[in-house]
Image (tube, rainbow, N blue to C red):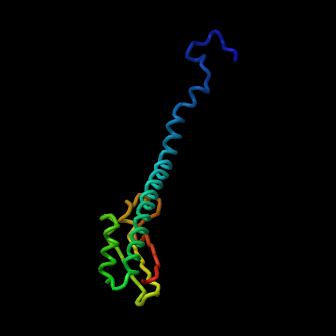
Amino acid sequence: MQLNPHQSAETQQPRRLTTRRGFAALELALVLPILGMILMGLMEFGMLMYARTSVVQACRQGARAASLAGVPNEQIEFEIRNVLPPALQQGLQVEVTGGEFTGDVVTVTLGVPMAAASPDLLWPIGYSLDGRYLISETSMIKE
């Protein structure tokens, strides 16, 4: 690039360097909300997966109790509540079906609201946890 010797030092700078000012701030402003939503989604997903493992474990424990002879439904729910963390016990739904006699299949179904397991972080993009449940079902043979 040839420079005119009569130009001042300020005007001798190539123009393309000064036209890129502010692009980094603009790119950050466009990308940061997307990265924030991805981070919040990963955090919410992780919390829900942790809660899911607790719900499955509690359902299995309830089914073990239900498979024993002469165990009332109150005892089954007590066993489930012993496994679940206190936060997941809010809105807990337990259903025990079948299994009157030895050899019958007894099924325990457990439902916990997702809102009890994780804060509703993705509602700004239209995904809400309200009215959704983590559900686990375990069947065992009655002893």
Instruction: Give x and y (percent) for residue 87.
Output: 31, 64
Quarter of the figure with residue 142: bottom left
Vertical relation: 118 (above or below) 112: above
Q: Is residue 134 left or right of residue 6?
A: left
Quarter of the figure with residue 46: bottom left
Vertical relation: 27 (above or below) 58: above
Instruction: Give x and y (percent) for residue 19.
Output: 57, 30
- The answer to which of 116 and 97 lies nearer the viewer is 97
- The answer to which of 9 and 66 lies nearer the viewer is 66
**Number of marks in the rendered image:** 0
Residue ID at (44%, 72%): 135
Instruction: Give x and y (percent) for residue 30.
Output: 51, 45
Residue ID at (57%, 31%): 20
Vertical relation: 77 (above or below) 30: below
- The answer to which of 122 and 10 lies nearer the viewer is 122
List the single residue furthest toward the top: 5
Which quarter of the figure is the N terminus placed in?
Answer: top right
Quarter of the figure with residue 49: bottom left
- The answer to which of 143 and 30 lies nearer the viewer is 143
List the single residue furthest toward the bottom: 101
Residue ID at (39%, 61%): 120
Vertical relation: 130 (above or below) 66: above
Instruction: Give x and y (percent) for residue 80.
Output: 34, 72
Which quarter of the figure is the C terminus placed in?
Answer: bottom left
